[in-house]
Image: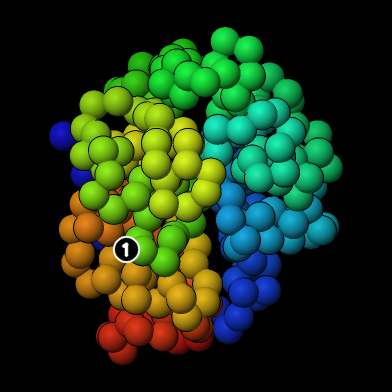
Amino acid sequence: MSTVSSPQVVVHRDPELLAAAAAARLTVRLVDVQNARRVASLVLTGGGIGIAMLEQLRRSPARDAVDWSRVEVFWGDERFLEPGHPDRNETQARAALLDHVPVDPARVHPMPAAEGPYQGDPERAARAYAEKLAELTSPEDHGLVPRFDVCLLGLGEEGHTASIFPSSPAVYESELSVVAVHHSPKPPPVRISLTLPAIRRSTDVWLLATGTAKAAAVSMALGGAGEVQLPAAGARGQRRTLWLLDRAAASKLPRDLVPPLI
C-alpha cells in the first residue's frame, strides 16, 4: 500500500513573491529530475496563483535550464468548455508559459474539451483522459496513472482542490483516476478532474494558496480535517507535500505550524 508524506509549510510575504519563489522551486525540481536522466512529469493547475507562477517562470532567465522537450505536461482539472475558451486552464497555461517554451506537443496532454465526440458527454471525456494516463504509465508506476514528479494544486475557500468539492461524489471516488464533475459550486458547473487517489500517486504535491479568504481552509486542512469535509486535506504526495502560502493565507495557522517568513 502506498504511503504519503506529512505536509510541510512554506510562507512568503505576498502573492508576487510566492509566485516567483514557486517558479524558482519548480525550475530546480524539473532540472533535478532531468539530471537523473528521466523525462519530468508535471501536473498544472489553474487559478490566479497557479497561472501567476507560470508567468513568473516564463519571465525567469532560469527557465532555459529546463529541457522543455523532456517535460510531460498534464492537468489536474479542467473546465468542460469549448477549445480555446479563455476560462479553460489549458488556454491560460498556454498563454502564461507553454506557448513561450519549446515543449514537445506530443508531451502536452490537455483534458478533452467540449467538442466533437465529447460534446455534452463529460463522462466520456473523463474516460478518455483516464485511458491516456494509463497508456503513459510504466511498470514501475504500479498503477493506472504515471508517478507525476510534481502535481501543482490550488485551494478553494471552502477547501476544494482540483475540481473535487466537499461532500461531492468525486471526493468519495476510490478507484477511478479521472471523473466528470457536475453541479460545481463554482462556474462553470461541468468539469473534469483527477481524483484524490490519482493525485496521491504523485511524488510531490504542492498546494498554492494566497489571501485571507483561504486562511480558514488552510488552517482546517493542516489541522486534521477529513478529506470529505475538506478535499485539500487529502491531497498528499508520496515523497513531499508542500503548502506554499502567502502571509495572509497562513494567518490562521497555529504558531507551531508557521515557519519563519521567507
Residue at the image point whose x is 57% and y is 10% from the top: 117
| Residue 34 is at least partly visible in this image | yes
* 232 vs 65, nearest the viewer: 232
Residue at the image point whose x is 42% and y is 66% from the top: 157
Depicted 192 relative to depicted 25: above or below: above
Residue that badge 1 annotates = 7
* 187 vs 145, nearest the viewer: 187
Residue at the image point whose x is 33% and y is 82% from the top: 253
> Percent x, y for residue 250?
42, 80
Depicted 55 relative to depicted 132: above or below: below
Mark 1: few, some, or many residues within 10 Å (few <14, many ≥20)?
Answer: some
- Secondary element under disc 1, as helix, strand or loop, is strand
Depicted 180 relative to depicted 228: above or below: above
> Percent x, y for residue 27?
65, 53
Residue at the image point whose x is 37% and y is 29% from the top: 179
* 41 vs 161, nearest the viewer: 161
Depicted 252 relative to depicted 25: above or below: below
The amino acid at mark 1 is Pro
> Percent x, y for residue 85?
71, 37
Scheme of colours in the image: rainbow
> Percent x, y for residue 257?
31, 80
In the rendered image, which quarter contains the N terminus? top left
| Residue 77 is at least partly visible in this image | no
In the rendered image, which quarter contains the C terminus? bottom right
